[in-house]
C-alpha cells in the first residue's frame, strides 16, 4: 500500500480501540483502510466523517434511553433534527450538483442514524424538490430556495386510498377554468383521498399532487403533477378546502408523519402545473412536446424511478448495519468447543459462516450496483433537463425504468431476509430491542411496498425483456441498450445451447462461472415466458389475462434473474478491473464469486430443469464452492465489516461495538423518562492534580407544546459551575477557561414567532450532590436557578398563548464523565 494511502487512511480512519475483535483484525488478509479508500474515495470518507461527527457532537441527536419516546414527541424531535440538517449545511448545493453520489451519501448517513430522519429529509428535498425541479420549468424555480431554507415543507402526493401501484387509475381531478386561469383540484370521494403520504401528517405545507388534468372541450389528458399549498406555513392550519391529517402509528419509522388529504374545489394558479410533460395555455388549450402518450406518462412519473433507485440504497444500508452487528457479535460470542474447557467464537462454525457471509457479500455487491444505477439515473435526468429528445435518451429511460423496477424488489427482499437471518444468528441478544436488529427489520419492511409493490414492479421489467425478444424475432432488431445490460441477448440462440462445464472446484471459485450461468438462465426464462404468453393467447385469453397467467414461475423469475445477472456482472467487472490495488484483489474477487454463486444456488432447480446442469456433480460443486469461499472469507469478515460499519454512536447496538466488548449486565439501568445517556456516559467525577473535579454536560430540548408551530430558534445558554476548578468540555467540544462554560441548546418559539418564557434548565451533580448554578437570557431577562441535589427534575411549567393554547416544555440535561 502506498504511503500516501496510509497517511490518508490514518487521518480519516483512525484505528479501532483494542478489544476482543483485535484477534480477527490481526488475521485479515488486507488493510480495511485501503479498501475503504478504494471503494469510497477520500472526499466521500471525509464527508461521511463530517456528518457522523456533527450528529454525535450535537445534543439534539442524543439517543433516547429507557424505552421509546411517545410518537408525538418523537415526530417533533425528528422535525427539529431535520431542520438542524438544513441549517448546518452539511452538503452545499454546488456539491450536490457536482457530485450526485454525495447526496446519496448524506441520505444514507442520516438513515444509518434514524430512517425517520432520513426519510423526512429525503421526501422534502429530494422527492418534493426534485419533482419540482425536474418536472417543472423556470416559473417553478421560485420554490427551490424556499425548500432549502424550509420556508415551505413538502411532500409527494401520488398514492390514493383505493389506488397505489395502478397510477393510471388515480381519481383526483384538476379541471381548468379559463375565466380565472386556475385549476380546480378535487377529490370526488373518500376513496380518492391521498394516502400514505410522508410528511403530510403534521408538517408539510405544500404537496406535489398528481391529478387527472381536464380542459374545457378537450377531455382528460391523463395524470399530471401540480404544486398545491395544503397548510399555512405560519400556523400549520389547513388551507381552505383541504382536509388533511395523520394516518396513525405504523410498524416502523414512526418519526415520519404519514398523512392523508382530501381536496374540495381547491383553486390553484395555472402556473402551478408542473409543465415539462404538458402545459395548458391561458385560453385552455393543452400542449405537450411528446407525440406518444406513453412517453408523456413516463415523464410525468419520472420521480418514481428516482425514488425506487434511492430505496435500493436504503435497503443496502439496512443490510450493512445488520451484518455489521451480527458478524461483530459472532466474532466475540463463544459457544462450545473441541473440549469442555475451551469455547470458540461462533463465527468459526461453518453454519454461522454460511448464514452470514453471503449477506456480507450481497451488501458489497448491491452497494456497488446501487451507486452505479444512481449515476445512470443522474445521466438520464441531465438529458431531460437539457431537453434531449434523441432515440438514445428514450431508450435509456426505458432501460433505467426496467432496472429500477426490479432492483427495488431484489434489494429490499435481500435486506429483509438478511436482517432476519442476522437477528436469528445473534440468538436471544438479537431479539433485544436495544441491539437494533428489530428496529432495522421494521424500518426496512416498507421498502418492499412503497413506490410500487415488489411483485407488481417485476412485471415492468419482464415486459421490457419480452418486448425486446418480440422486436428481435419479428423485426430482426438488435438487442442493444445504452447501458449494455441486454446486449448479451444478441447471442440468445447460442447461449441457450451452452452447458455447465467447469473442470474443477478451483475454477468454480470465480464470478465468471455464475455470470455465464446467469446469462443462460435469463435466456431460458425469457424463452419459457414468451412461450407461456403465446400459449395463453392461443388458448383464447386476452392480453390482460395472458400476462396475468404468466407471472408465477415465469415472468417474475425472469425479472429477478435478469437483475441478479446485472448485479453480478457489474460487481464482477468492478472487482476485476486493472485499477484494483493488488492487496485488495483476492478479497474483492472472493466477495464477487460468493455473491454470484450464492444467488445462483437459489435457482438450482431451474438450472437442472432447463438442462444447463446435469448430473449431481454440478450442484455439489456449486455448494462446495460456496462453503469454501465462506471459509476463505471468515478471517476477513471483521475487517470487511469495519469498512462499511458507521461509528458506534450511529450503529447504536451494544453487541455490535467496534471494540467487541459486550454490554456489562451490572451497569445501572437508564433513569426513567426523558432522554437518558448511554451507559458509557454514566456520571463519574475525575479529580485533577489540584483536587478539582469536572463533568461533561449535554443539553437537549424536547418541545412539548400543543401549538401547531414546529419552528425553533437557537439560543445561547451560559452554564457556570460554582465549584473548584469549574468548567469542563461541553457539548460542542470547546474547552473553556475559568469558571464559565457555554453550550448551544435549542428552544422553541411561540406560534407568533416570539420566544415563549418557558425554558427550564436542569443541572445534575456529577456523582454526588454538588451545587451548580445555571443562568440564561430569555426575552431580555436573566433567570437563575440553583440545583443542589442530583436528578431533581422540576415539574414542567405550562403557559397559555394568546389564542388560549396550553403547552408544556422540559429541558433535559444529559451528562457524562470527561
Image (cartoon, rainbow, N blue to C red):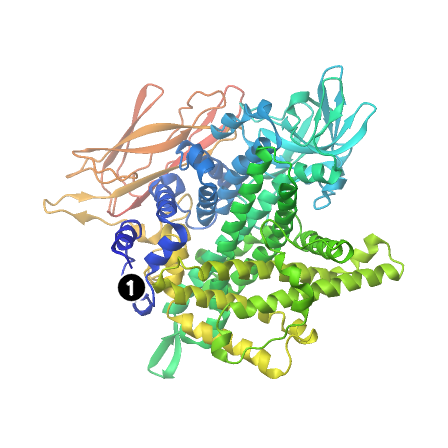
- Name the residue beneath numbered marker 1: 19
SS label for mark 1: loop
744 left or right of 97 in image? left
In front here: 451 or 340?
A: 451
What percent of the width, then of the height, locates residue 438?
Answer: 51, 57
At 70% across and 65% down in the image, what residue appears?
525
What percent of the width, then of the height, locates residue 171?
Answer: 76, 36
Query: Does residue 536 sit above or below 140 in this rendering?
Result: below
147 left or right of 294 in image? left
Residue positioned most to the front = 476
- Examine the image and state in which quarter residue 656 appears: bottom left
In front here: 607 or 641?
A: 607
What percent of the width, then of the height, locates residue 484?
Answer: 59, 54
Query: Does residue 714 sit above or below 359 in this rendering?
Result: above
At 56% across and 44% down in the image, what residue appears?
377
Q: How many numbered circles does the render carry?
A: 1
What percent of the width, then of the height, locates residue 241?
Answer: 69, 24
Query: Does residue 32 sit above or below 189 in this rendering?
Result: below
Report whether residue 504 is seen. Answer: yes
Residue positioned most to the left = 690
Q: Quadrant of the N terminus?
A: bottom left
Report whether residue 84 is seen. Answer: no
The crowding category of the residue bearing disc 1, from other C-alpha atoms within 10 Å (few below 14, some 14 to 19, many at least 20), is few
At 54% across and 62% down in the image, what residue appears?
568
In front here: 228 or 239?
A: 228
Residue positioned most to the top = 179
550 left or right of 711 in image? right
Residue positioned most to the bottom = 339
Amino acid at each position: 500500500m502506498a504511503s500516501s494511502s496510509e497517511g490518508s487512511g490514518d487521518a480519516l480512519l483512525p484505528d479501532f480501540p483494542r478489544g476482543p475483535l483485535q484477534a480477527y483484525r490481526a488475521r485479515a488478509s488486507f488493510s480495511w483502510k485501503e479498501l475503504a479508500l478504494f471503494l469510497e474515495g477520500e472526499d466521500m470518507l471525509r464527508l461521511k466523517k463530517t456528518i457522523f461527527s456533527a450528529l454525535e457532537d450535537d445534543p439534539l441527536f442524543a439517543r433516547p434511553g429507557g424505552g421509546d419516546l411517545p410518537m408525538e414527541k418523537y415526530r417533533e424531535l425528528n422535525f427539529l433534527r431535520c431542520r438542524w440538517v438544513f441549517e448546518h449545511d452539511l452538503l452545499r448545493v454546488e456539491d450536490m450538483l457536482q457530485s450526485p453520489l454525495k447526496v446519496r451519501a448524506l441520505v444514507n448517513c442520516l438513515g444509518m442514524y434514524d430512517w425517520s430522519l432520513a426519510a423526512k429529509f429525503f421526501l422534502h428535498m429530494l422527492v418534493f424538490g426534485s419533482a419540482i425541479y425536474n418536472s417543472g420549468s423556470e416559473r417553478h424555480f421560485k420554490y427551490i430556495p424556499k425548500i432549502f431554507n424550509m420556508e415551505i415543507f413538502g411532500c409527494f402526493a401520488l398514492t390514493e386510498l383505493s389506488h397505489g401501484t395502478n397510477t393510471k387509475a388515480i381519481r383526483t381531478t384538476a379541471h381548468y377554468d379559463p375565466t380565472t386561469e386556475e385549476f380546480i383540484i378535487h377529490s370526488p370521494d373518500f376513496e380518492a383521498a391521498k394516502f400514505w403520504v410522508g410528511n403530510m401528517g403534521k408538517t408539510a405545507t405544500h404537496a406535489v399532487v398528481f391529478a387527472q388534468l381536464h380542459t374545457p372541450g378537450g377531455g382528460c389528458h391523463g395524470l399530471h403533477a401540480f404544486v398545491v399549498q395544503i397548510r399555512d406555513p405560519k400556523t400549520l392550519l389547513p388551507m381552505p378546502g383541504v382536509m388533511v391529517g395523520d394516518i396513525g402509528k405504523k410498524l416502523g419509522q414512526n418519526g415520519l408523519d404519514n398523512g392523508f388529504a382530501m381536496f374540495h374545489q381547491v383553486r390553484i394558479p395555472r402556473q402551478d402545473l408542473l409543465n415539462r410533460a404538458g402545459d395548458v395555455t391561458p385560453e385552455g388549450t393543452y400542449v405537450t412536446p411528446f407525440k406518444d402518450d406513453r412517453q408523456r406518462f413516463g415523464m410525468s412519473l419520472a420521480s418514481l424511478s428516482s425514488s425506487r433507485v434511492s430505496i435500493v440504497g436504503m435497503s443496502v444500508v439496512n443490510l450493512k448495519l445488520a451484518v455489521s452487528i451480527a458478524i461483530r457479535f459472532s466474532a466475540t460470542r463463544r459457544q462450545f468447543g473441541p473440549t469442555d474447557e475451551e469455547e470458540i467464537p461462533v463465527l468459526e462454525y461453518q453454519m454461522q459462516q454460511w448464514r452470514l457471509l453471503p449477506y456480507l457479500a450481497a451488501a458489497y455487491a448491491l452497494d456497488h450496483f446501487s451507486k452505479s444505477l444512481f449515476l445512470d439515473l443522474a445521466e438520464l435526468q441531465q438529458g431531460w433537463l437539457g431537453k434531449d429528445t434523441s432515440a438514445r435518451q428514450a431508450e435509456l429511460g426505458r432501460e433505467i425504468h426496467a432496472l429500477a423496477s426490479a432492483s427495488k424488489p431484489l434489494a429490499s427482499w435481500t435486506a429483509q431476509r438478511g436482517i432476519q437471518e442476522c437477528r436469528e444468528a445473534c440468538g436471544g441478544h438479537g431479539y433485544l430491542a436495544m441491539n437494533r436488529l428489530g428496529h432495522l427489520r421494521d424500518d426496512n419492511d416498507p421498502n418492499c411496498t412503497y413506490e410500487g409493490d415488489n411483485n407488481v414492479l417485476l412485471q415492468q421489467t419482464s415486459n421490457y425483456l419480452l418486448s425486446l425478444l418480440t422486436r428481435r424475432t419479428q423485426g430482426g432488431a438488435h438487442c442493444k441498450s445504452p447501458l449494455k445490460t441486454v446486449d448479451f441477448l444478441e447471442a440468445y440462440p447460442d447461449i441457450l445451447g451452452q452447458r455447465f462445464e467447469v473442470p474443477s472446484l478451483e475454477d468454480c471459485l470465480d464470478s465468471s462461472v455464475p455470470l455465464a450461468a446467469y446469462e443462460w438462465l435469463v435466456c431460458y426464462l425469457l424463452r419459457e415466458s414468451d412461450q407461456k404468453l403465446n400459449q395463453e393467447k392461443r388458448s383464447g385469453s386476452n392480453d390482460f389475462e395472458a400476462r396475468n397467467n404468466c407471472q408465477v414461475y415465469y415472468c417474475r423469475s425472469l425479472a429477478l434473474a435478469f437483475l441478479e445477472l446485472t448485479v453480478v456482472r457489474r460487481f464482477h467487472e468492478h472487482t476485476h478491473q486493472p485499477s484494483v490495488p493488488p492487496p485488495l484483489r483476492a478479497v474483492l474477487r472472493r466477495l464477487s464469486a460468493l455473491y454470484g454463486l450464492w444467488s445462483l444456488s437459489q435457482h438450482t432447480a431451474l438450472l437442472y430443469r432447463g438442462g444447463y446442469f446435469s448430473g449431481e456433480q454440478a450442484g455439489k460443486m456449486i455448494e462446495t464452492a460456496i462453503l469454501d469461499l465462506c471459509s476463505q472469507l471468515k478471517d476477513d469478515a471483521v475487517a470487511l465489516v469495519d469498512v462499511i460499519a458507521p461509528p458506534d454512536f450511529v450503529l447504536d447496538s451494544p453487541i455490535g461495538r467496534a471494540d467487541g466488548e459486550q454490554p456489562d449486565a451490572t451497569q445501572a439501568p437508564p433513569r426513567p423518562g426523558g432522554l437518558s445517556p448511554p451507559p458509557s456516559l454514566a456520571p463519574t467525577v475525575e479529580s485533577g492534580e489540584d483536587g478539582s473535579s469536572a463533568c461533561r454536560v449535554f443539553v437537549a430540548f424536547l418541545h412539548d407544546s400543543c401549538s401547531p408551530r414546529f419552528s425553533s430558534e437557537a439560543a445561547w445558554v451560559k452554564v457556570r459551575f460554582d465549584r473548584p476548578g469549574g468548567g469542563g468540555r461541553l457539548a460542542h467540544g470547546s474547552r473553556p477557561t475559568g469558571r464559565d462554560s457555554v453550550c448551544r441548546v435549542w428552544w422553541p418559539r411561540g406560534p407568533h414567532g416570539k420566544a415563549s418564557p418557558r425554558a427550564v434548565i436542569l443541572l445534575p451533580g456529577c456523582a454526588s450532590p454538588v451545587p451548580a448554578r445555571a443562568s440564561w437570557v430569555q426575552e431580555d431577562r436573566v433567570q437563575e436557578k440553583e440545583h443542589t441535589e442530583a436528578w431533581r427534575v422540576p415539574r414542567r411549567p405550562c403557559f397559555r398563548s394568546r389564542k388560549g393554547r396550553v403547552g408544556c416544555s422540559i429541558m433535559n440535561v444529559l451528562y457524562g464523565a470527561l
